[in-house]
Amino acid sequence: MSPPTRRRFLRAGGLALGVGLAGCATRALDGDRDDATPSPTASEPTYARRVDAPESTTVRNHDGEPVVRSSAHTPEANLFEESASWAYEAWLVADQRDREALDVSRATAGADAARQFLADTDLSTATVLVHQYTVPECETHRLDRLEWRTDAQCGDRACVDIQLRYEDTTWDGDCQASETDELDGGPPYPEGTYASEATLVRIPSEIQSYGSFGYQV
């Protein structure tokens, strides 16, 4: 079963949205979604379900190299990349095979906590969403909210849409501010001015796949 075949990132006002389209991650649903077109004025979907301050942990690589990879998942190119990489990626960890396939780099802040978070997750009651992204080197994202809806459409089937909402805060560690930190913009950032982060968040176990993933900062 294949992961999403396309991704798109939208700019809506001052909010950055990352969306995975066409099919579903992990255990994919059949059918594509070809009707979505990037637009700066795209309306925000309504999410019927939400969890404030969901259980999560964040790992960070100050050098900008991706911090989490998986031998059970293949990254795909998105609007920020010329070719597929792990820099901007989201996928689900729904069973023991998915968990064993994860590789959390030891050269990161929070690596031990992330491994413990994964080990402590009961995959019969929770699925883990891995969201990897870049941030300016003196900033970090703090997860505020998980939202999802189960009535989205993947072709002729209903599927799940997921959104994460972050607060953009100052990184409490050693860093050197660059001009990027002063800009009201988003990725991709110039080489040497960003860190890589991955947020691991527990979501309901009934979510075994998704049709669309997005985030707001």
Image (cartoon, rainbow, N blue to C red):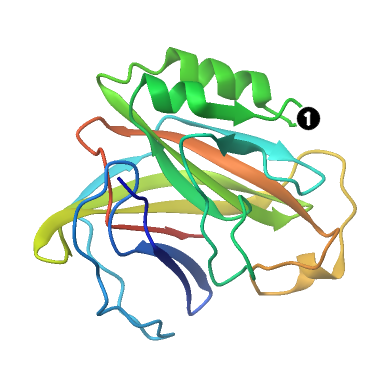
Amino acid type at mark 1? Ala
Is residue 95 shown above or below 181?
A: above
Please identify the residue farthest to the front as the structure is shown: 1
- Rendered position, 6 above or below 93: below
Quadrant of residue 120 within the rendered picture: top left
Residue 49 vs 191, above or below: the answer is: above
Name the image quarter holding the N terminus. top left
Left/right of residue 91 with respect to residue 21 in the rendered view: right
Residue found 62% across the figure and 65% down from its top? 83
Q: Position of residue 81 (x, y in %)?
A: 63, 68
Q: Position of residue 35 (x, y in %)?
A: 25, 80
Q: Quadrant of residue 54?
A: top left
On screen, residue 43 above or below 65: below
Q: Which residue occupies the foreground of this view, 58 or 4?
A: 4
Left or right: 117, with 37 as reference point: right
Whole-percent x, y for residue 69 in the image: 59, 37
Q: Nearer the viewer, residue 66 or 186?
A: 66
Residue lying at 73% horizontally and 30% vertically, measured from the top left: 109
Task: In this rendered view, identify the residue nearer to me: 39 or 72.
Answer: 72
Label 1: few (<14), some (14–19) or many (≥20) C-alpha neighbours in 10 Å: some
Question: Which residue: 53% across, 67% down?
Answer: 78
Q: Which residue is mark 1?
A: 107
SS for tag 1? loop
Q: Position of residue 164 (x, y in %)?
A: 41, 51
